[in-house]
Amino acid sequence: MTVLHLRAAGASLVLDARGAAVPAILHWGADLGDVPLDALADALVPAVPPSSIDVPLRLSLLPSLFEGWTGRPALQAEFRLVSAHADGNTAVVRCASPDSTLEVRTELELSPEGVLRIRHRLTNRGPAPVGVPGLDVVLPLAAEASELLDFTGLWSHERQPQRGPLRHGVWSRESRHGRPGHDDAFLLMAGEPGFDFRRGRVWAIHLAWSGDKRIWAERSALGHSVLGAGELLAPDEIRLAPGSSYETPWLVAVFSETGVDGLSDRLHPWIRARSPLRLPRPVVLNTWEAVYFDQDLSVLSDLADAAAAVGVERFVLDDGWFTGRRDDKRALGDWHVDPAVWPDGLHPLISRVRRNGMDFGLWVEPEMISPDSRLAAAHPDWILDHGPTWRWQRVLDLSVPEAYDYLLTRISALLTEYPIAFLKWDHNRDLLVPGVAHRQTTALYRLLAALRARFPHVEIESCASGGARIDLGILDLVDRFWTSDTNDPLDRQRIQRWTSVLIPPEYLGGHLGAGTAHVTGRTSDLGFRLATALFGSAGIEWNLTAATPAERARIAAWVAEHKRLRPLLHSGRVVRAGDHLHGVVAQDRTQAVFALVTVGSPTVALPPPVRFPGLDPDRLYTVRPIGTPPRVVQDAPPAWLAAGSVTLPGRVLAEVGLPVPLLAPEQALLLSVDG
């Protein structure tokens, strides 16, 4: 055996696979260069402290009590190394129990962008069934990574950051929703104290899985600090028959020397390379907040005309189109177009949409079933849960072959009969049934994959009561995420800022809503709403027929501006500075667009100059305002803004910055930076 070294883009992973023990992880972090590996491995053997095991304790790929590790184990079982080899930046390690009845195969991949992926596969080689209580991936942390950042949230308020020190013990976040949930930890970061968007060394992990999971950090009194994650399994949820295997979800791990933005610098290019989208991303109008369940051909035809007039490219008919669906209390599962509402089917509306130059999308919620539905009456045995309803609905058991086939057949029939380009795939409740999340999630993945194979032209959006299922497990099977059910720009600023640390902005749906947000009741200026919805996969969720001519003209100008900018927005490098500035810089650094945002009242009379990260220090850039001018509270603007623009080197813009206008609360100034 040997010492394995995976290196890419300034990151390294070193495994000591010498001897018979499970390989030890010697290093995960900054690139170590062309180091002599045997000498490194020998040099990193630690001391043996008093009152401890009598051999040096090193963190292995499968830490457990059998190695002297008293922290949270990867799997509480004893293993020996069978084989280890690397091919470029991919390594495979095989370990087996002393009696050879259990085998673990570990795959490690370090991408060209420096993104590390690891997963285990446990195989039962014995004569009797074996239960799997859990199998986690565990990675070491450097000692200086003593501050944690992860997320919590609730419906319409996802991705709320929370920070704290990594003390002795375990910080563990467990999800039992049957989906990641609105309170999903999402991305667990550990970094140097005080790390922020632009500075500090940061180590981060994400579990690419759409079901129950746990993600955790631990600082042991033994001296080690670790990050770990795995699927959260109920007792006996996974039992392996002889010869069968369980494969963990991929753990995605990223190291950055330049703060949180450095994580995005690795993750976004990696995601774009492995799961490319069809570009440009179309501007969407979704009908939900425009009409809710009150669907009518005449009303929706007028809305389609208004959408086309402002430049919309995709018209999505939301909930309410199928048999008996007049409110949210009935009919889920009856996936037939309602003849009472649509006597000629959806053909007249789709024809109107397509004549206007737009494609057509449709809302579905296939994983759910209403107790008051024809499907529930015919197949009560397909219902997964019998506890309290949630939004008046229950869960359809996708592991029942007949239920799975019914969904595949009905959705295929809709996609065959109608020229549908897009499905908004919703999921509006937790499962609330122990021991079923694994089979439900894997069945969902199979269903999505089967539909994509049959209808490769159809794009799918993952919506789960808003942003309750945004993860890298489902990302390979969808083309868009609905980031949150709120269109309130004040909430959206924070939600989008943090969600985009992991997910590139072109995947993240952000819609222009009505002046008074339907979820919060808060009223916002049109300019603030437009600026907030500009940066991602842009859309509208507003009854445009009720908008004034002046509002429609401003919306049309915004759509045109988004179309002009989206080649940059959907391919560039996302940068952030504090709570008030975010932007996208072209990969060649020839142009950028930034948003200066105020979310509350000022704390000083003159804010500090705004500095623009990510620019070429030796290039001259012209900075000018674009979009709707924000409201300000000032007697005179900064001189450069009064002049209309300023041209300065990138080094000056990054190090000194520019004086800012005194924006009123809940305003945004858009700035174009062209070199």
Image: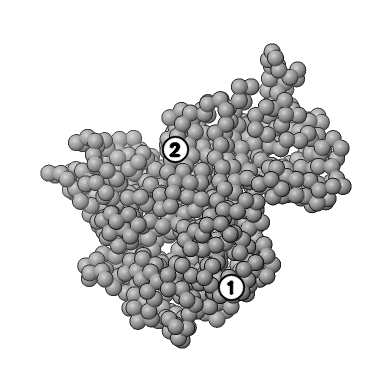
Q: Which residue is at 73% across, 19% downward?
A: 53
Name the front one of labels 2 and 1: 1
Query: Is 171 placed left or right of 244 in the picture?
Result: left
Secondary structure at badge 1 equals: helix
Q: Which residue is at 48% across, 70% downward?
A: 330
Q: Which of the 4 quarters of the picture holds residue 137?
A: top right
Residue 646, image x, y percentages: 25, 46
Q: Which residue is mark 2?
A: 162
Residue 63, image x, y percentages: 70, 32
Three-letter amino acid code of the residue under disc 2: Gln
Tell me the colour scheme of the image.
Answer: one colour
Residue 523, image x, y percentages: 26, 56
Looking at the image, can residue 675 be seen?
A: no
Looking at the image, can residue 155 be seen?
A: yes
Q: What quarter of the picture does the N terminus occupy?
A: top right
Q: Is residue 616 above or below residue 446?
A: above
Q: CA distance from mark 2 to mark 1?
A: 45 Å
Q: Is residue 592 above or below residue 71?
A: below
Q: Which residue is mark 1?
A: 377
Q: Are marks 2 and 1 in contact (CB under 8 Å)?
A: no
